[in-house]
Amino acid sequence: MIRETTKSDFEEFWPCFERIVKAQETYAFEPDMSYEDTFHLWCKTPLKSFVLEENGKVLGTYFLKANAQGPGNHICNCGYMVNEHARGKGIAKKLCEHSQQTALALGFKAMQFNSVVSSNSVAVNLWKKLGFTIIGTVPFAYRHSKLGHINSYIMHKQLRL
């Protein structure tokens, strides 16, 4: 079941979220962000935040927000995280498909991911399978904890004209 995130959902997911951010392999967030700052960033600042729950456990989450303001507010941006114990089960695919339906219902015309770390081949390949295209490469945009400075991709999908 995918539903809007509650504070208790985020509290449950927080240890996984914290591990992902501290690993510095996929997200450009400060590795020492506090729980409150992270909750605000993921659940309060965006337009919407959702979790995928199965058997009473939060397995993944995403946020959806406008990518820009004013004349650029018809393109949305999302971020997704999946619990490491639930990977390979189609959770990210379900979250992304849900986010596209939600974006359309909210009137967005396109979805853009601003910084997909190039070494995150699982995400890059999934986004491509779901119709996203790499529209740009930002050289050495990400300081990966193990690989050093690597590229990030800008990925885009038109949802409607």
Image (cartoon, rainbow, N blue to C red):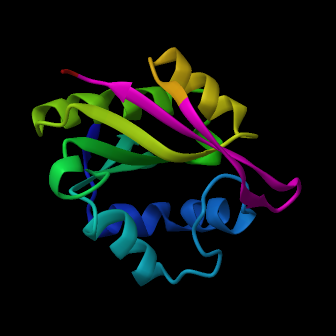
Q: Is residue 136 left or right of residue 149?
A: left
Rendering quarter of residue 74: top left
Q: Is residue 160 magenta?
A: no
Q: Is residue 11 above or below residue 3?
A: below
Q: Is residue 18 above or below residue 75?
A: below
Q: Is residue 27 left or right of residue 79?
A: right
Q: Is residue 148 magenta?
A: yes
- Whole-percent x, y for residue 91 in the image: 48, 32
Residue 76 in view (yes/no): yes
- Quarter of the picture containing the C terminus is top left
Span of residues in magenta: 135-159
Q: Is residue 87 left or right of residue 71?
A: right
Q: Is residue 138 above or below residue 35?
A: above
Residue drawn at 62 percent across, 23 percent down? 125
Residue drawn at 21 percent across, 57 percent down? 47
- Whole-percent x, y for residue 154 in the image: 53, 40
- Quarter of the picture containing the N terminus is top left
- Whole-percent x, y for residue 7 in the image: 30, 69
Q: Is residue 54 above or below residue 89?
A: below
Q: How many marks?
A: 0
Q: Is residue 98 left or right of residue 116?
A: left
